[in-house]
Image (tube, rainbow, N blue to C red):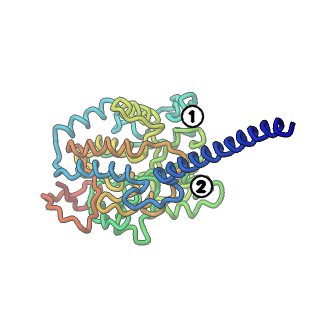
Amino acid sequence: MRGQLSRPFSFLMIILFLGILLILTISYILDKSDEELHRLKPPKKDTPQSSDSCKYCKEQEEIEKLKELYSQPWKKQEGNYQHYRSLLSSKCHGYDKAIITQANTPVGTKLVYDGEKKRTLHVNAEIFSTFAKGHPFSNKTLQTCTVVGNGGILANSSCGKMIDAAQFVIRCNLPPLSDGYEKHVGNHTDLVTANPSILLEKYGALMGRRRSFVESLRKYGNSLLLIPAFSYGHNTPVSLRTFYTIEDFGSPTQPVFFNPKYLQSLERFWRSKGLRSVRLSTGIIMASLALELCANVDLYGFWPFSFHPDDFHALTNHYYDNRQTKVKFHAMPAEFKFLLELHTQGVLRLHLENCSRVNVQYSLKSQKCDSCGRSLHYG
Protein backbone atom coordinates (compact mmCIF):
# COMPACT_ATOMS: atom_id res chain seq x y z
CA MET A 1 0.00 0.00 0.00
CA ARG A 2 2.76 2.46 0.93
CA GLY A 3 4.67 1.64 -2.25
CA GLN A 4 1.58 2.39 -4.30
CA LEU A 5 1.17 5.85 -2.65
CA SER A 6 4.83 6.78 -2.91
CA ARG A 7 4.97 6.36 -6.69
CA PRO A 8 2.50 9.22 -7.52
CA PHE A 9 4.18 11.42 -4.94
CA SER A 10 7.64 10.80 -6.46
CA PHE A 11 6.26 11.48 -9.92
CA LEU A 12 4.70 14.75 -8.69
CA MET A 13 8.00 15.83 -7.12
CA ILE A 14 9.84 15.16 -10.37
CA ILE A 15 7.28 17.24 -12.33
CA LEU A 16 7.57 20.08 -9.78
CA PHE A 17 11.37 19.99 -9.95
CA LEU A 18 11.37 20.09 -13.74
CA GLY A 19 8.88 22.98 -13.68
CA ILE A 20 11.05 25.00 -11.32
CA LEU A 21 14.10 24.25 -13.47
CA LEU A 22 12.26 25.39 -16.62
CA ILE A 23 11.16 28.65 -14.96
CA LEU A 24 14.71 29.40 -13.79
CA THR A 25 16.08 28.68 -17.29
CA ILE A 26 13.56 31.00 -19.00
CA SER A 27 14.21 33.72 -16.43
CA TYR A 28 17.96 33.44 -17.00
CA ILE A 29 17.53 33.69 -20.78
CA LEU A 30 15.28 36.77 -20.48
CA ASP A 31 17.72 38.48 -18.11
CA LYS A 32 20.62 37.88 -20.48
CA SER A 33 18.58 39.17 -23.44
CA ASP A 34 17.63 42.31 -21.55
CA GLU A 35 21.24 42.81 -20.50
CA GLU A 36 22.40 42.43 -24.10
CA LEU A 37 19.74 44.90 -25.31
CA HIS A 38 20.92 47.50 -22.78
CA ARG A 39 24.50 46.90 -23.79
CA LEU A 40 23.68 47.52 -27.46
CA LYS A 41 21.38 50.52 -26.82
CA PRO A 42 22.56 52.45 -23.77
CA PRO A 43 20.00 54.77 -22.19
CA LYS A 44 20.18 58.33 -23.56
CA LYS A 45 19.72 59.93 -20.16
CA ASP A 46 22.71 58.25 -18.61
CA THR A 47 25.11 58.70 -21.51
CA PRO A 48 26.68 62.16 -21.88
CA GLN A 49 26.74 63.50 -25.43
CA SER A 50 30.01 64.63 -26.90
CA SER A 51 30.43 68.05 -28.51
CA ASP A 52 30.59 66.30 -31.89
CA SER A 53 27.12 64.81 -31.46
CA CYS A 54 25.35 67.76 -29.84
CA LYS A 55 21.71 68.57 -30.31
CA TYR A 56 22.60 71.56 -32.49
CA CYS A 57 24.30 69.53 -35.23
CA LYS A 58 21.39 69.94 -37.66
CA GLU A 59 21.53 73.70 -37.26
CA GLN A 60 25.28 73.68 -37.77
CA GLU A 61 24.90 71.59 -40.92
CA GLU A 62 22.36 74.10 -42.21
CA ILE A 63 24.71 76.98 -41.38
CA GLU A 64 27.52 75.34 -43.35
CA LYS A 65 25.28 75.13 -46.43
CA LEU A 66 24.28 78.79 -46.09
CA LYS A 67 27.92 79.82 -45.58
CA GLU A 68 28.84 78.13 -48.84
CA LEU A 69 26.23 80.18 -50.70
CA TYR A 70 27.25 83.39 -48.92
CA SER A 71 30.98 82.85 -49.55
CA GLN A 72 30.65 83.53 -53.28
CA PRO A 73 32.01 86.98 -54.26
CA TRP A 74 29.21 89.54 -54.23
CA LYS A 75 28.54 91.89 -57.12
CA LYS A 76 25.45 93.93 -57.77
CA GLN A 77 23.51 92.62 -60.77
CA GLU A 78 21.69 95.68 -62.08
CA GLY A 79 19.31 93.68 -64.26
CA ASN A 80 18.22 91.44 -61.38
CA TYR A 81 17.83 94.45 -59.08
CA GLN A 82 15.69 96.38 -61.58
CA HIS A 83 13.53 93.31 -62.21
CA TYR A 84 12.85 92.72 -58.52
CA ARG A 85 12.26 96.40 -57.84
CA SER A 86 9.77 96.53 -60.71
CA LEU A 87 7.94 93.46 -59.37
CA LEU A 88 7.59 94.98 -55.90
CA SER A 89 6.49 98.35 -57.28
CA SER A 90 3.80 96.83 -59.52
CA LYS A 91 2.46 94.38 -56.93
CA CYS A 92 2.80 96.36 -53.68
CA HIS A 93 3.22 100.07 -54.56
CA GLY A 94 5.31 100.68 -51.45
CA TYR A 95 6.49 104.13 -52.49
CA ASP A 96 2.91 105.46 -52.57
CA LYS A 97 1.05 103.12 -50.24
CA ALA A 98 3.37 101.75 -47.53
CA ILE A 99 2.52 104.64 -45.20
CA ILE A 100 -0.96 106.09 -44.69
CA THR A 101 -1.23 109.69 -45.81
CA GLN A 102 -4.11 112.13 -46.09
CA ALA A 103 -3.77 111.80 -49.86
CA ASN A 104 -4.12 108.00 -50.12
CA THR A 105 -6.60 107.53 -47.24
CA PRO A 106 -9.25 110.29 -47.15
CA VAL A 107 -12.07 110.72 -44.63
CA GLY A 108 -14.68 107.99 -45.08
CA THR A 109 -12.20 105.30 -46.14
CA LYS A 110 -12.90 101.84 -44.73
CA LEU A 111 -9.63 100.38 -43.48
CA VAL A 112 -9.43 96.59 -43.30
CA TYR A 113 -7.01 95.39 -40.61
CA ASP A 114 -4.30 93.24 -42.18
CA GLY A 115 -4.03 90.95 -39.14
CA GLU A 116 -7.80 90.68 -38.60
CA LYS A 117 -9.47 90.57 -42.00
CA LYS A 118 -12.98 90.81 -40.52
CA ARG A 119 -12.22 93.96 -38.54
CA THR A 120 -12.69 97.31 -40.25
CA LEU A 121 -12.42 100.96 -39.26
CA HIS A 122 -14.10 103.94 -40.93
CA VAL A 123 -11.74 106.92 -41.04
CA ASN A 124 -13.34 109.91 -39.34
CA ALA A 125 -12.02 113.47 -39.14
CA GLU A 126 -10.15 112.87 -35.85
CA ILE A 127 -8.29 109.78 -37.09
CA PHE A 128 -7.65 111.49 -40.43
CA SER A 129 -5.88 114.32 -38.61
CA THR A 130 -3.23 111.87 -37.38
CA PHE A 131 -2.26 110.78 -40.91
CA ALA A 132 0.87 112.16 -42.59
CA LYS A 133 -0.02 115.36 -44.42
CA GLY A 134 2.68 115.09 -47.06
CA HIS A 135 4.50 112.28 -48.81
CA PRO A 136 6.99 110.77 -46.32
CA PHE A 137 9.67 109.92 -48.89
CA SER A 138 11.72 111.95 -51.31
CA ASN A 139 10.61 111.77 -54.93
CA LYS A 140 14.19 110.87 -55.85
CA THR A 141 15.59 107.37 -55.62
CA LEU A 142 17.82 107.14 -52.56
CA GLN A 143 21.34 106.01 -53.45
CA THR A 144 22.23 103.92 -50.38
CA CYS A 145 19.86 102.42 -47.80
CA THR A 146 20.70 100.19 -44.87
CA VAL A 147 18.15 98.12 -42.97
CA VAL A 148 19.38 97.12 -39.51
CA GLY A 149 17.89 94.05 -37.89
CA ASN A 150 18.41 93.31 -34.21
CA GLY A 151 20.07 89.90 -34.47
CA GLY A 152 22.74 88.81 -31.99
CA ILE A 153 25.25 88.63 -34.84
CA LEU A 154 25.68 92.42 -34.49
CA ALA A 155 27.06 92.11 -30.95
CA ASN A 156 30.78 93.04 -30.99
CA SER A 157 30.64 93.39 -34.78
CA SER A 158 32.15 96.90 -35.06
CA CYS A 159 29.76 97.64 -37.93
CA GLY A 160 28.56 101.02 -36.63
CA LYS A 161 30.59 103.17 -39.04
CA MET A 162 29.59 101.13 -42.08
CA ILE A 163 25.91 101.32 -41.09
CA ASP A 164 26.03 105.07 -40.43
CA ALA A 165 27.63 105.73 -43.84
CA ALA A 166 24.35 105.00 -45.65
CA GLN A 167 22.15 107.82 -46.93
CA PHE A 168 19.02 106.35 -45.36
CA VAL A 169 19.08 104.02 -42.31
CA ILE A 170 16.06 101.97 -41.24
CA ARG A 171 15.93 100.37 -37.78
CA CYS A 172 13.42 97.94 -36.29
CA ASN A 173 11.40 98.03 -33.06
CA LEU A 174 13.00 100.88 -31.09
CA PRO A 175 16.41 99.24 -30.51
CA PRO A 176 19.01 100.64 -28.06
CA LEU A 177 21.78 102.67 -29.71
CA SER A 178 23.78 103.97 -26.72
CA ASP A 179 25.75 102.41 -23.83
CA GLY A 180 28.44 101.12 -26.19
CA TYR A 181 26.10 99.68 -28.81
CA GLU A 182 26.74 102.56 -31.21
CA LYS A 183 30.19 101.12 -32.04
CA HIS A 184 28.51 98.00 -33.39
CA VAL A 185 25.19 99.27 -34.77
CA GLY A 186 25.73 103.01 -35.27
CA ASN A 187 23.18 105.68 -34.38
CA HIS A 188 22.20 107.33 -37.67
CA THR A 189 18.44 106.77 -38.03
CA ASP A 190 15.99 108.01 -40.66
CA LEU A 191 13.14 105.58 -39.97
CA VAL A 192 12.49 103.36 -36.97
CA THR A 193 9.56 101.01 -36.45
CA ALA A 194 7.71 100.50 -33.18
CA ASN A 195 5.81 97.32 -32.41
CA PRO A 196 2.84 98.25 -30.18
CA SER A 197 3.75 95.36 -27.87
CA ILE A 198 6.85 97.38 -26.85
CA LEU A 199 4.67 100.39 -26.09
CA LEU A 200 2.37 98.19 -24.02
CA GLU A 201 5.04 96.35 -22.05
CA LYS A 202 7.77 98.96 -21.63
CA TYR A 203 5.74 102.16 -21.40
CA GLY A 204 2.46 100.97 -19.87
CA ALA A 205 0.56 101.63 -23.09
CA LEU A 206 1.20 105.35 -22.42
CA MET A 207 -1.67 105.38 -19.95
CA GLY A 208 0.38 107.02 -17.19
CA ARG A 209 3.53 109.12 -17.21
CA ARG A 210 4.77 109.54 -20.75
CA ARG A 211 7.94 111.63 -20.44
CA SER A 212 10.28 108.62 -20.29
CA PHE A 213 8.92 107.43 -23.64
CA VAL A 214 9.45 110.81 -25.29
CA GLU A 215 12.97 111.04 -23.87
CA SER A 216 13.75 107.56 -25.23
CA LEU A 217 13.01 108.84 -28.74
CA ARG A 218 15.78 111.47 -28.61
CA LYS A 219 18.39 109.01 -29.86
CA TYR A 220 16.43 108.68 -33.12
CA GLY A 221 16.39 112.45 -33.75
CA ASN A 222 13.81 113.66 -36.28
CA SER A 223 13.32 110.23 -37.82
CA LEU A 224 10.03 108.75 -38.94
CA LEU A 225 8.44 106.49 -36.30
CA LEU A 226 6.51 103.84 -38.24
CA ILE A 227 3.75 102.02 -36.31
CA PRO A 228 1.38 99.20 -37.44
CA ALA A 229 -1.68 100.96 -35.96
CA PHE A 230 -4.17 99.04 -38.09
CA SER A 231 -2.87 95.48 -38.03
CA TYR A 232 -4.90 94.40 -34.97
CA GLY A 233 -7.70 96.14 -33.11
CA HIS A 234 -5.75 96.42 -29.86
CA ASN A 235 -2.94 98.22 -31.71
CA THR A 236 -5.05 101.23 -32.63
CA PRO A 237 -5.64 102.96 -29.26
CA VAL A 238 -1.99 102.79 -28.13
CA SER A 239 -0.79 103.89 -31.57
CA LEU A 240 -3.05 106.96 -31.46
CA ARG A 241 -1.84 107.72 -27.92
CA THR A 242 1.71 107.54 -29.25
CA PHE A 243 0.86 110.14 -31.89
CA TYR A 244 -0.77 112.45 -29.31
CA THR A 245 2.11 112.01 -26.84
CA ILE A 246 4.71 113.01 -29.42
CA GLU A 247 2.56 115.96 -30.46
CA ASP A 248 1.90 117.09 -26.86
CA PHE A 249 5.61 117.01 -25.92
CA GLY A 250 6.79 118.65 -29.14
CA SER A 251 9.15 115.81 -30.02
CA PRO A 252 10.91 116.09 -33.40
CA THR A 253 10.12 112.43 -34.11
CA GLN A 254 7.46 112.10 -36.83
CA PRO A 255 4.89 109.34 -36.13
CA VAL A 256 3.40 107.66 -39.20
CA PHE A 257 1.25 104.54 -39.66
CA PHE A 258 1.68 101.45 -41.82
CA ASN A 259 -1.00 101.13 -44.46
CA PRO A 260 -2.72 97.75 -43.95
CA LYS A 261 -3.38 97.54 -47.71
CA TYR A 262 0.37 97.59 -48.31
CA LEU A 263 1.04 94.90 -45.69
CA GLN A 264 -1.67 92.70 -47.24
CA SER A 265 -0.25 93.08 -50.75
CA LEU A 266 3.28 92.43 -49.50
CA GLU A 267 2.14 89.25 -47.76
CA ARG A 268 0.56 88.06 -51.02
CA PHE A 269 3.74 88.90 -52.90
CA TRP A 270 5.99 86.82 -50.64
CA ARG A 271 3.45 84.01 -50.48
CA SER A 272 3.53 83.84 -54.28
CA LYS A 273 7.30 83.33 -53.96
CA GLY A 274 6.76 80.38 -51.64
CA LEU A 275 7.25 82.04 -48.25
CA ARG A 276 4.78 80.70 -45.69
CA SER A 277 4.47 82.40 -42.31
CA VAL A 278 1.78 83.59 -39.92
CA ARG A 279 3.07 87.14 -40.37
CA LEU A 280 6.01 88.69 -42.16
CA SER A 281 8.72 90.01 -39.84
CA THR A 282 9.41 93.73 -39.62
CA GLY A 283 12.85 93.05 -41.12
CA ILE A 284 11.65 91.56 -44.40
CA ILE A 285 8.91 94.21 -44.67
CA MET A 286 11.47 97.01 -44.40
CA ALA A 287 13.92 95.26 -46.73
CA SER A 288 11.12 94.99 -49.31
CA LEU A 289 10.28 98.68 -48.94
CA ALA A 290 13.95 99.64 -49.20
CA LEU A 291 14.22 97.85 -52.55
CA GLU A 292 11.52 100.17 -53.90
CA LEU A 293 13.07 103.32 -52.45
CA CYS A 294 16.80 102.75 -52.91
CA ALA A 295 19.35 102.00 -55.61
CA ASN A 296 21.62 100.05 -53.22
CA VAL A 297 20.30 98.08 -50.23
CA ASP A 298 22.45 96.62 -47.42
CA LEU A 299 21.15 94.44 -44.61
CA TYR A 300 22.79 93.99 -41.19
CA GLY A 301 21.64 91.92 -38.22
CA PHE A 302 19.40 89.53 -40.16
CA TRP A 303 21.17 86.27 -39.20
CA PRO A 304 18.43 84.15 -37.50
CA PHE A 305 20.49 81.31 -36.05
CA SER A 306 21.92 80.74 -32.58
CA PHE A 307 25.53 80.25 -33.78
CA HIS A 308 27.81 82.70 -35.56
CA PRO A 309 28.57 81.63 -39.15
CA ASP A 310 32.30 82.36 -38.80
CA ASP A 311 33.31 80.27 -35.80
CA PHE A 312 30.02 78.86 -34.45
CA HIS A 313 30.20 80.68 -31.13
CA ALA A 314 26.81 81.03 -29.44
CA LEU A 315 24.74 84.14 -30.16
CA THR A 316 22.01 85.83 -28.16
CA ASN A 317 18.62 86.35 -29.81
CA HIS A 318 19.16 90.12 -30.05
CA TYR A 319 22.38 92.11 -29.93
CA TYR A 320 21.15 93.72 -26.70
CA ASP A 321 19.38 90.79 -24.92
CA ASN A 322 18.47 87.13 -25.22
CA ARG A 323 14.72 87.50 -24.87
CA GLN A 324 12.81 84.98 -26.97
CA THR A 325 9.51 85.68 -28.69
CA LYS A 326 6.57 84.08 -26.91
CA VAL A 327 4.78 82.99 -30.07
CA LYS A 328 6.40 81.94 -33.34
CA PHE A 329 4.63 84.37 -35.66
CA HIS A 330 7.56 84.74 -38.04
CA ALA A 331 9.39 82.19 -40.19
CA MET A 332 12.78 83.81 -39.66
CA PRO A 333 15.09 81.10 -41.13
CA ALA A 334 12.81 80.79 -44.17
CA GLU A 335 12.80 84.57 -44.65
CA PHE A 336 16.59 84.64 -44.37
CA LYS A 337 16.94 82.05 -47.14
CA PHE A 338 14.85 84.20 -49.47
CA LEU A 339 16.99 87.24 -48.64
CA LEU A 340 20.16 85.19 -49.13
CA GLU A 341 18.86 84.21 -52.56
CA LEU A 342 18.46 87.91 -53.40
CA HIS A 343 22.02 88.43 -52.12
CA THR A 344 23.42 85.73 -54.41
CA GLN A 345 21.49 87.28 -57.32
CA GLY A 346 23.09 90.68 -56.63
CA VAL A 347 19.73 92.33 -55.81
CA LEU A 348 20.73 93.41 -52.28
CA ARG A 349 23.69 92.77 -49.98
CA LEU A 350 23.60 90.84 -46.73
CA HIS A 351 26.39 91.43 -44.20
CA LEU A 352 27.34 88.54 -41.90
CA GLU A 353 30.98 89.37 -41.29
CA ASN A 354 32.62 91.07 -38.34
CA CYS A 355 33.36 94.50 -39.76
CA SER A 356 36.59 94.93 -37.78
CA ARG A 357 38.13 91.91 -39.52
CA VAL A 358 37.09 92.73 -43.03
CA ASN A 359 39.27 94.64 -45.46
CA VAL A 360 36.91 95.13 -48.36
CA GLN A 361 38.08 97.30 -51.23
CA TYR A 362 35.20 99.61 -52.14
CA SER A 363 35.08 101.72 -55.25
CA LEU A 364 34.05 104.83 -53.36
CA LYS A 365 32.10 107.67 -54.76
CA SER A 366 31.05 110.74 -52.81
CA GLN A 367 27.72 112.42 -53.06
CA LYS A 368 26.00 115.02 -50.90
CA CYS A 369 22.73 113.96 -49.34
CA ASP A 370 20.08 116.44 -50.54
CA SER A 371 18.21 116.44 -47.26
CA CYS A 372 20.95 116.23 -44.67
CA GLY A 373 24.20 117.35 -46.32
CA ARG A 374 25.95 114.14 -45.20
CA SER A 375 28.84 112.93 -47.32
CA LEU A 376 27.90 109.52 -48.70
CA HIS A 377 30.00 106.63 -49.93
CA TYR A 378 28.56 103.86 -52.00
CA GLY A 379 29.79 101.25 -54.42
Res. 223 in view: no
- Name the foreground residue: 351 vs 58: 58
Viewport quadrant of the N terminus: top right
Q: Is residue 7 above or below residue 377?
A: above
The image position of residue 19, as x and y in percent, is: 68, 41
- Name the foreground residue: 242 vs 175: 175
Q: Residues within 10 Å of mark 1 (few under 14, many from 20)?
A: few
The image position of residue 259, as x and y in percent, is: 45, 37
Q: How many marks?
A: 2
Name, please, the residue furthest toward the bottom.
180
Q: Is residue 54 above or below residue 134?
A: below
The image position of residue 353, as x and y in percent, is: 27, 60
Q: Residue at x 26, y 52 (%)?
A: 67
Viewport quadrant of the C terminus: bottom left
Callout 2: SS: helix
Q: CA distance from mark 2 to mark 1?
A: 29 Å
Q: Residue at x 44, y 59 (%)?
A: 49
Q: Is residue 193 above or below residue 322?
A: above
Q: Are marks 2 and 1 in contact (CB under 8 Å)?
A: no
- Closest to the camera, between mark 2 and mark 1, is 2
The label shown at residue 201 is 2
Callout 1: SS: loop
Q: Residue at x 70, y 44 (%)?
A: 17
Residue type highlighted by circle 1:
Asn
Q: Is residue 123 above or below residue 210?
A: above
The image position of residue 124, as x and y in percent, is: 57, 34
Give the residue at mark 1.
Answer: 124
Q: Residue at x 42, y 65 (%)?
A: 177
Residue type highlighted by circle 2:
Glu
Q: Residues within 10 Å of mark 2 (few under 14, many from 20)?
A: few
- Name the foreground residue: 51 vs 357: 51
